[in-house]
């Protein structure tokens, strides 16, 4: 399901959101992007634009999965089938961000094993990078934007690669992880290419609401308390 704010519909951007004079006005506007209103859009299209307007089949992935389950709750009469490939909202007590992270750990371990089976040469490279970061002053290396890359930050890169961009892209980054040593005895340094690519890979500048709301969508009657930091 394509939803409001994607494709050619009006997106939310940091600059456009700054047009609102108060946080309350912005919050009221953001309600239009909730799953229930996306279901309203789908039902409007089904009834007004689809020939015969009978129940149809929807496919939900990621946030689309949340919208599809909301569709089942608000307008089941419009559905023939619901196919979910990912994105399941919390249903019942005990389903929260902590539970979601715990369920993901086993899959992350499996994907790590697959990656190193495919690129065994990267085992030693990654080990060297982790040691280099841990032994650097302050426990990390400065990033081009001013942040610090730490061993823990490097782990985030792995999780992102396994979920979105693929093994090859991650491997290509590690192929150019070190600056070339042009002068004998020069200290070993992480390359600007690698540090810059790391930042671009994880950049959420255009998806800032994702950072703030990603955990809250898994909450059922209780806050997440920044579960990812636990």
Image (cartoon, rainbow, N blue to C red):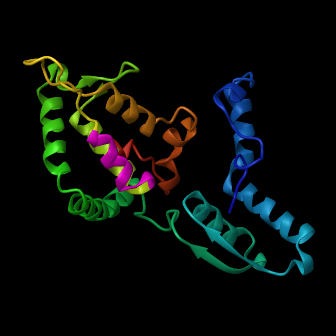
User: What residue is at 46 percent from the left and 51 percent from the top?
Assistant: 222
Q: Residue 134 colored magenta?
A: no
Residue 46 vertical position relative to residue 214 in the rendered view, above or below: below
Q: Which residues are magenta?
A: 164-175
Relative to residue 199, is residue 110 depicted above or below? below
Answer left or right for 92 relative to 7.
left
The picture quadrant where one finds residue 184 is top left
Residue 230 in view in this figure: no
- Residue 166 pos. (x, y %): 40, 55
**Magenta stretch contains residue 174:** yes
**Which of the pair 211/120 is nearer the observer?**
120
Q: Is residue 11 left or right of residue 201?
A: right
Which residue is nearer to you in this view: 50 or 33? Answer: 50
Residue 140 location, quadrant: top left
Q: Residue at x 55, y 35 (%)?
A: 208
Question: Depth check: 17 or 110 in front?
Answer: 110
Query: Which residue lies at the image location 64% right of the left edge and 67% below the top edge?
Result: 68
């Amino acid at each position: 399901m394509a939803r409001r704010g994607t494709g050619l519909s009006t997106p939310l951007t940091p600059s456009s959101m700054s047009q609102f004079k108060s946080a309350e006005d912005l919050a009221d506007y953001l309600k239009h992007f909730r799953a229930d209103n996306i279901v309203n859009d789908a039902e409007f299209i089904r009834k007004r634009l689809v020939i015969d307007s009978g129940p149809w089949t929807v496919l939900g992935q990621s946030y689309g999965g949340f919208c599809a389950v909301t569709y089942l709750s608000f307008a089941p009469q419009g559905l023939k089938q619901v196919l979910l490939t990912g994105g399941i909202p919390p249903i019942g007590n005990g389903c929260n961000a902590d539970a979601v992270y715990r369920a993901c750990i086993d899959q992350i371990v499996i994907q790590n094993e697959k990656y190193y089976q495919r690129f065994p040469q990267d085992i030693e490279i990654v080990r060297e990078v982790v040691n280099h970061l841990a032994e650097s002053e302050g426990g990390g290396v400065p990033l081009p934007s001013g942040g610090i890359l730490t061993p823990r930050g490097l782990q985030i890169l792995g999780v992102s690669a396994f979920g979105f961009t693929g093994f090859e892209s991650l491997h290509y980054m590690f192929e150019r992880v070190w600056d070339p040593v042009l002068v004998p005895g020069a200290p070993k340094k992480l390359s600007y290419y690698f540090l810059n690519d790391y930042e671009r890979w994880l950049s959420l500048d255009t998806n800032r609401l994702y950072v703030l709301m990603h955990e809250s969508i898994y909450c059922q009657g209780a806050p997440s308390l920044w579960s990812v930091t636990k």
